[in-house]
Image (cartoon, rainbow, N blue to C red):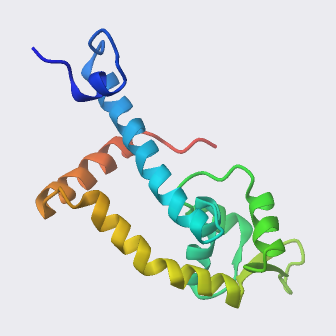
Amino acid sequence: MTAAKLQHEIKKKHPFEMLEQEAALNILRTNDRLSIRFARLFRDHGLTPSQYNVLRILRGEGAPLPILEIASRTITVVPGITGLIDRLERDGFAKRVRCEEDRRVIFVALLEKGEKVVNALDQPIRVLHKEVMKHLTRRELAELIRLLEKVRESLAPEA
């Protein structure tokens, strides 16, 4: 029997102890590779993946959002959402706006510079999505999505 592809990639001398371990490590390895590709693209536009994520959320909403609402919508958990908003504000991509009804609530609004950079990334991101998934059929993509969603169902978000 030949070594599994991941086992070979990471030069692991012995087979994985169980399929669950191999599957989980395959997901992590794939996430790492995808993250690197997207991070390079965002870096070329002066953003981190987390900054892009926030700007994308704000553009999609079309209106300012409370900081905690933005945090709940991000693809990856952002532990330092306040610092992230600070950097977006400092770089002129977004601004904080205090809620008039409840001064304790802070909204974040997308600025023109932020909208321009997100719009400029639309096509390159579509191209990258197609490039990294081009070897999968539509049926395989649907099955991959289904399986990943099934795995995620058992992983309750940590509070």
Residue 25 in the image: above or below residue 125: above
Vertically, is 95 above or below 39?
below
Quadrant in the picture for the C terminus: top right
> Is 32 on the left-hand or right-hand side of 97?
left
Tell me which residue sits at (14%, 64%) in the image.
138
Give the farthest residue toward the front.
44
Residue 145: percent from left, percent from top: 27, 55
**Residue at (26, 59) in percent of width and height:** 133
**Front-lying residue, 147 or 111:** 111
Q: Position of residue 16 (x, y in %)?
A: 29, 15
Whole-percent x and y of residue 67?
Answer: 73, 68
Task: Measuring from the top left, give residue 21's x and y in whole percent.
Answer: 34, 23
Q: Along the horizontal axis of the image, is 112 left or right of 145?
A: right
The residue furthest right is: 103
Pick the residue in front: 51 or 21: 51
Locate the N terminus by quadrant. top left
Q: Quadrant of residue 73?
A: bottom right
Q: Is residue 72 left or right of residue 131?
A: right
| Residue 110 showing in the rendered view | yes
Q: Is residue 40 above or below residue 122?
A: above
- Asked if residue 75 shows in the view, the reply is no
In the image, residue 88 sits, relative to residue 116, either above or below, namely: above
Residue 135, picture quadrant: bottom left
Numbered circles on residues, count? 0
Residue nearest the observer in this picture, 97 or 56:
56
Q: Residue at position x 42%, y 51% from top?
A: 34
